[in-house]
Image (spheres, helix red, strand yellow):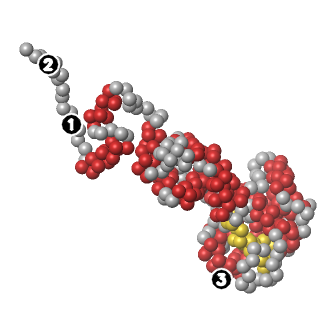
Amino acid sequence: METRNLIETKTLAIRLKESDVAALNQRFRLDSFGNLTELVRAYLDGQLIRSSTTDHIERLLLRLKEREIIDPLSGEASPTFYKNIDIEDFRRYLKTKYKHSRYGNDLVNYYQRFAHFFFTKPDVVRAESGRNRSWICDAMRRFAEYYDYRYQNPEMRLLVKEIIERYEINRNMRRHDLVWIADKNYLDSAITKILTAFNKGELSTLIRFALFTGLRGTEVSYVHTKPICPRLGGCSCENLHVVNKSNGISVLVVNRIVGQKHCYFTICPTWLWLAFRSLSKTDYEVRKIAHVQIKSKMNNEISFMDLRKFNYNVNARSEMREQGAEVLAGRAKTVSARHYLMNEIDLLSEQYERAWQRYSTLCNVD
């Protein structure tokens, strides 16, 4: 008589939304499981171990497979695909996108430093400062554009966008763009102290020019050495265009764009512009000395970079209001800057003169 060893089995059931069934079947195919039974058996055999440290990587790998984003070397989906990108090719690609190679190099550097964290540990990136996260997001977006260009796969753009939004990496990145000083008395006192402390010599001229124009450090050096074009109407050359108004104010048309930093035009007293152009040097080393001197005389409460913030606040509190201040700070849209330059530059220069008249008087200039 034949006997059989019967193994008692039970049937288990799960409830899923109908819309999830197709996704589940696709996940089975990607992970080489034929059905739910094979998945459970693999789990029982210890082949599947849940770890919170690998959850994100597993999700990343799934998205890479779904979107057919491959490792350039292996040709397969890999969570470390970003390590095998041709960095020099990426750098060359950025040089075709940006006029100034320094900005492209900075983006490449941020990509090399943070790509690992961005794709595998985005929480680390989210803990960075707003300034760093701004650079990281820009670097990853440019990388996604490069990947699409090189491998004809726009899915990388969507993946980068998804990570940025899912982990809120771009949240509160530009806190430095908010109005920095709330107290008008402090603003007036700080500017008065600076103009009083630096009242003669080339270093004082440099500091005053940075304060009255609100230019960034590199922009200060740029306008100091850039040739001036004598043509004013309809000229689109790369040189500076300077208009000296009858009220003693000069309008400097700069049109300099480096990465995300824009400088359309600025305004300053004509006497200060002429004194500034006669300076022997305004390079980084000289600006560094100015920075150290300001901190020393202002008890470490004010730096060279704060001069730009002072300028913005004076302009924003004047008749220009915030809109005019944004244009001069280079943060408005190009069309807004063009509108001011073509239609309201006389009004803007008059408003600027009234806003800065008190501080011009402190410079012993009528």
Q: CA distance from mark 1 to mark 2?
A: 28 Å
The residue furthest left is: 1
- Residue 126, percent from left and from top: 54, 45
Q: Amino acid at mark 2?
A: Arg
Q: Are circles 3 and 2 on residues that touch, CB within 8 Å?
A: no
The amino acid pointed to by label 3 is Asn
User: Which one is nearer the viewer's eye here, 339 or 320?
Assistant: 339
Q: Position of residue 242 (x, y in %)?
A: 79, 77
The residue at 30%/30% (across/down) is 41
Mark 1 crowdedness (10 Å alpha carbons): few <14, some 14-19, many ≥20: few
Mark closest to the chain's N terminus, 1 or 2: 2
CA gap between label 3 and label 1 equals 73 Å
In the rendered image, which residue does mark 1 sit on? Answer: 13
> Which residue is identified by label 2?
4
Mark 1: which secondary structure? loop
Q: At numbered mark 2, what does the secondary structure look like: helix, strand or loop?
A: loop
Q: Could you tell me residue 112's position as x and y percent?
A: 63, 46
Give the number of the mark in front: 1 or 2: 2
Residue identifier under label 3: 343
The mark nearer the N terminus, 3 or 1, is 1
Q: Residue furthest top?
A: 1
Q: Residues within 10 Å of mark 3 (few under 14, many from 20)?
A: few
Residue at x-position 21% and y-position 36%: 13
Kind of residue at disc 1:
Ala
The quadrant of the picture occupied by the N terminus is: top left
Q: Can you name the residue that lies furthest to the bottom here?
A: 233
Q: Quadrant of residue 196?
A: bottom right
Q: Nearer the viewer, residue 117 or 252?
A: 117
Q: Are marks 1 and 2 in contact (CB under 8 Å)?
A: no
The reply to whether residue 75 is in sight is yes
Question: Seen in the image, is 218 located left or right of residue 104?
Answer: right
